[in-house]
């Protein structure tokens, strides 16, 4: 097993295996402070993630997390405003890897309308534990997962008017709390 702390992007055997298997795809790879990252196109993410689970040299058998990042106002240029991030663990090879797919919205992100550019394939068919994690990303960021068995909000109510982890969402909210009666210790 190679030591991830000593590996560089050109020497990492798993990254090299993926690049070799998907030589016709646009891939970017990095190793920073021992953390291996693979950046893939959103339309290729599902196929590459399945390969990372099934290939004998990879065997990323555990989906640790699915999350997203909003790069609005980030000082360094990114390929897209949002990134969906899958955190994978291989117990057999004692490795951790991040897989990222960037998405760029085509509509104004201050509302809740479904943006066709903010979609990526669900990985629930690869790791069943992705179901709730993908629902959380949908609820908080508005990124939809095609093929998800039950894509609905999980942390906010059904008619919530926005996606609160988007950076253009106001810190004090958009009037969600004004309709509720304030209850303090003396009124109970």
Image (cartoon, helix red, strand yellow):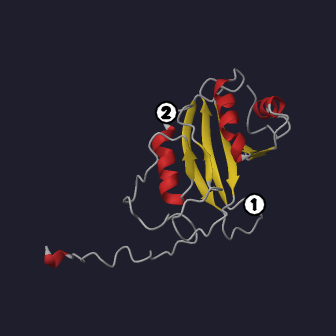
**Closer to the camera, 130 or 98?**
130
Q: Secondary structure at mark 2?
A: loop
**Closer to the camera, 8 or 18?**
18
Q: Is residue 22 visible?
A: yes
**Closer to the camera, 100 or 90?**
100
Q: Is residue 144 left or right of residue 176?
A: right
Q: Quadrant location of the N terminus?
A: top right
Residue located 49% across and 75% down the image: 171
From the image, tell me which residue sits under label 2: 128
Residue 20 image position (x, y, % from top left) = 84, 30
Q: Secondary structure at mark 1?
A: loop
Q: Earlier in the sequence, mark 2 or mark 1?
A: 1
Residue located 54% across and 43% down the image: 65
Residue located 74% across and 32% down the image: 3
Q: Quadrant location of the C terminus?
A: bottom left
Q: Is residue 174 left or right of residue 86?
A: left
Residue 102 marker: none
Label 2 Cα neighbours within 10 Å, binned few <14 / some 14-19 / many ≥20: few
From the image, tell me which residue sits under label 1: 78
Q: Is residue 34 visible?
A: no
Q: Quadrant of residue 51?
A: top right
Residue 57 versus residue 184 in the image, above or below: above
Residue 148 image position (x, y, % from top left) = 51, 41
Label 1 Cα neighbours within 10 Å, binned few <14 / some 14-19 / many ≥20: some
Instruction: Kindly report the distance in space between the C-alpha atoms of the residues bearing marks 2 and 1.
Output: 30 Å
Residue 159 image position (x, y, % from top left) = 39, 63
Residue 137 versus residue 45 in the image, above or below: below
Residue 67 versus residue 126 in the image, above or below: below
Cβ atoms under marks 2 and 1 closer than 8 Å: no
Residue 158 image position (x, y, % from top left) = 38, 58
Tally the marks.
Answer: 2
């Amino acid at each position: 097993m190679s030591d991830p702390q000593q590996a560089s992007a050109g020497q990492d055997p798993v990254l090299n295996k993926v690049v070799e298997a998907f030589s016709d795809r646009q891939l970017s790879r990095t190793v920073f402070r021992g953390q291996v990252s693979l950046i893939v196109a959103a339309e290729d993410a599902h196929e590459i993630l399945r390969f990372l689970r099934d290939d004998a040299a990879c065997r990323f058998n555990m989906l640790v997390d699915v999350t997203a990042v909003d790069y609005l106002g980030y000082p360094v240029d990114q390929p897209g405003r949002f990134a969906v991030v899958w955190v994978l663990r291989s117990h057999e090879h004692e490795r951790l890897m991040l897989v990222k797919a960037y998405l760029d919205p085509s509509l104004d992100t201050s509302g809740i309308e479904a943006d066709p550019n903010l979609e990526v394939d669900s990985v629930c068919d690869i790791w069943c534990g992705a179901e709730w994690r993908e629902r959380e990303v949908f609820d908080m960021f508005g990124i939809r997962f095609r093929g998800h068995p039950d894509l609905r909000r999980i942390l906010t109510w059904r008619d919530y008017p926005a996606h609160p982890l988007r950076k253009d969402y106001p810190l004090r909210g958009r009037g969600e709390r004004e309709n509720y009666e304030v209850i303090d210790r003396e009124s109970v």
